[in-house]
Image (tube, grey):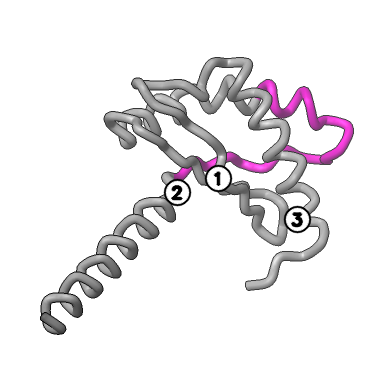
Amino acid sequence: MIEGKRQKQVAAVLEKELNDIFQRLGLTMIDGGMVSIASVKITPDLFDARIYLSFFKVKDAIATLKFIQEKSWEIKKELTARVRHQLRSMPQLTFFIDDTLDYVDKMEQLFKEIKSNELKKDK
């Protein structure tokens, strides 16, 4: 599904403001690791925003996600105050774990395995 121009604009505004809010609320360093916003995706009707969070060296990503979801009311309240002049209505925020780094790591491990198996065959 191709994102429209307005979807991209709203997503960029939300991502910028959410980064600032996360830093202000101290949500970037949780559980001995780092939390960052990987991407923001908006539905075509601009009513739902899916926020993908990237976790780096966080001990328990699911517990951290639940903690952020518990803070979602506070996050949305501040976000609404910041973008009230740019959006007619505030999208519903839904947080997800961005697993692309895990996927990349898994793929690298598979490539290393393949390469080591090929080297063993050549010997």
Instruction: Check disc 1: other Cα within 10 Å, few if <14, some if 14-19, many if 20+.
Output: some
Residue located 33% across and 35% down the image: 61
Q: Nearer the viewer, residue 59 or 66?
A: 59
Query: Which residue is drawn at the image coordinates 58% and 20% (left, top)?
Result: 74
Q: In the rendered structure, which amino acid carries the disc numbered 1?
A: Ala
> Residue at label 2?
98
Please state the horizontal and vertical placement of residue 29, each as a whole percent of the image: 46, 21
- Kind of element beneath mark 3: helix
Q: Residue at x 19, y 70 (%)?
A: 116
Which class describes the residues within 10 Å of circle 2: few (<14), some (14-19), or many (20+)?
Answer: some
Q: Position of residue 117 (x, y in %)?
A: 15, 75
| First of labels 2, 3 by sequence position | 3
Q: Earlier in the sequence, mark 1 or mark 3?
A: 3
The residue most toward the front is 123
What crowding class fits label 3: few (fewer than 14 Cα within 10 Å), some (14-19), or many (20 or more)?
some
Inspect the image, locate mark 2, and give the three-letter code of the amino acid beneath it: Asp
Query: Residue placed farthest to the bottom in the image?
Result: 122
In front of the other: 15 or 112: 112
Magenta segment, which residues? Answer: 77-96
**Structural distance between the alpha carbons of marks 2 and 3:** 19 Å
Would you say residue 91 sits in the magenta stretch?
yes
Placement of 55 over or under 122, stated as above or below: above
